[in-house]
Image (tube, helix red, strand yellow):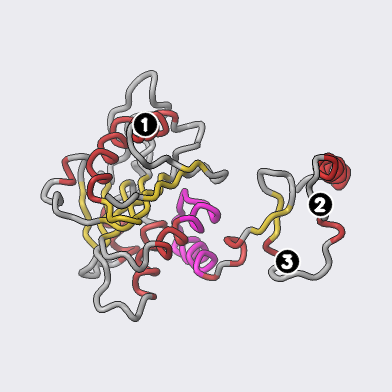
């Protein structure tokens, strides 16, 4: 959280620029006051993930089980939003890059919470469960084998084996075999590397339902320049444009064909 002195200077600057500024020390009563925290702008803005019961419960449960997720609270909120945004669209939900299953567990819980649906959508989870594949020098900063501290058994124990969950074990794009006829409403892509991200975009994009969301978890992270390069290259000649957000993620809405 920034210092009051810095906040006053920033407030004065914004006021001179024509913005209506109400510094945090002037705010008394407002809805969800505790959810307003300092973020990228240096001003307190609404942080709904700070008070979201689903995310709080998920993080507490993972801690009790002695496991963890690399997807922080703010990025988990974006994932929940993407799920709710596409709730009325028929289609499957895919996650490419599962690691220990924290975000997959969030998706499973959101699916089960939708009591009014005739049947749950298919949740397909793609991972080698052996860590990262070979990297490309000059494009990727990670190392082969990173994130290998997981296993299919551990993730299955965490999520269970409900009939709507499809565990696809192996390397992308081979694990997409047999899924050419799929229609996808939400794709959560967290692959870190150039080639696997490029291969995923190539296969998934054409199978996205109109209005569906492709959510790239690692687009803006300094450690994943290869993933961002793959995404930017893929969408360079597409009608959609990735929206980079301060969480490090990027969002793409699939335009109707």
Residue 112, by quadrant, is: bottom left
| Residue 21 badge | 2
* Residue that label 3 marks: 33
| Residue 236 badge | 1
Mark pair 2, 1: CA separation: 38 Å
Mark pair 2, 3: CA separation: 17 Å
| Magenta span of residues | 54-78
Asked if the residues shown at circle 1 and circle 3 are in contact, with their CB atoms under 8 angstroms apart, the answer is: no
Q: Nearer the viewer, mark 1 or mark 3?
A: 1
Comes first in the chain, label 1 or label 3: 3
Q: Residue at x 73, y 44 (%)?
A: 42
Q: Residue at x 83, y 62 (%)?
A: 27
Q: Main secondary structure of the magenta part?
A: helix
Q: Residues within 10 Å of mark 2 (few under 14, many from 20)?
A: some
Asked if residue 186 is positioned above or below residue 145 in the image, the reply reads below
Residue farthest top in this picture: 138
Asked if the residues shown at circle 2 and circle 3 are in contact, with their CB atoms under 8 angstroms apart, the answer is: no
Q: Nearer the viewer, mark 2 or mark 3?
A: 2
Residue 208: say if magenta: no
Q: Where does the image place residue 149, in percent across and percent down from the top left?
A: 36, 45
Residue 59: say if magenta: yes
Classify mark 2: helix, strand or loop.
loop
Residue 67, by quadrant, is: bottom left
Classify mark 1: helix, strand or loop.
loop
Q: Where does the image place residue 164, in percent across and percent down from the top left?
A: 23, 67
Classify mark 3: helix, strand or loop.
helix
Q: Residues within 10 Å of mark 3 (few under 14, many from 20)?
A: some
Q: Residue at x 30, y 55 (%)?
A: 210
Q: Report the side of 5 relative to 83 (left or right).
A: right
């Amino acid at each position: 959280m920034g210092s009051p002195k810095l906040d006053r200077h920033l407030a004065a600057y914004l006021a001179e620029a024509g913005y209506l500024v109400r510094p945090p020390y002037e705010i008394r009563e407002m809805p969800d006051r505790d959810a307003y925290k300092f973020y990228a702008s240096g001003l307190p803005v609404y942080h709904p993930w700070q008070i979201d019961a689903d995310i709080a419960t998920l993080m507490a449960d993972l801690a009790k089980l002695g496991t963890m997720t690399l997807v922080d609270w703010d990025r988990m909120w974006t994932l929940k939003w993407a799920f709710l945004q596409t709730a009325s669209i028929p289609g499957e939900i895919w996650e490419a890059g599962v690691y220990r299953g924290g975000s997959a567990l969030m998706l499973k819980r959101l699916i089960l919470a939708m009591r009014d649906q005739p049947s749950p959508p298919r949740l397909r989870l793609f991972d080698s469960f052996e860590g990262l594949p070979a990297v490309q020098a000059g494009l990727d900063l990670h190392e082969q084998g990173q994130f290998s501290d997981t296993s299919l058994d551990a993730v299955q124990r965490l999520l269970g084996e409900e009939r709507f969950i499809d565990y696809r074990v192996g390397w992308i794009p081979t694990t997409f075999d047999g899924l050419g006829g799929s229609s996808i409403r939400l794709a959560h892509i967290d692959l870190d590397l150039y080639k696997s991200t490029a291969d995923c975009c190539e296969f998934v994009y054409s199978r996205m339902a109109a209005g569906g969301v492709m959510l790239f978890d690692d687009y803006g992270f300094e450690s994943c320049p290869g993933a961002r390069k793959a995404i930017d290259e893929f969408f360079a000649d597409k009608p959609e444009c990735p929206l980079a957000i301060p969480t490090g993620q990027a969002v793409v809405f699939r335009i109707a064909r």
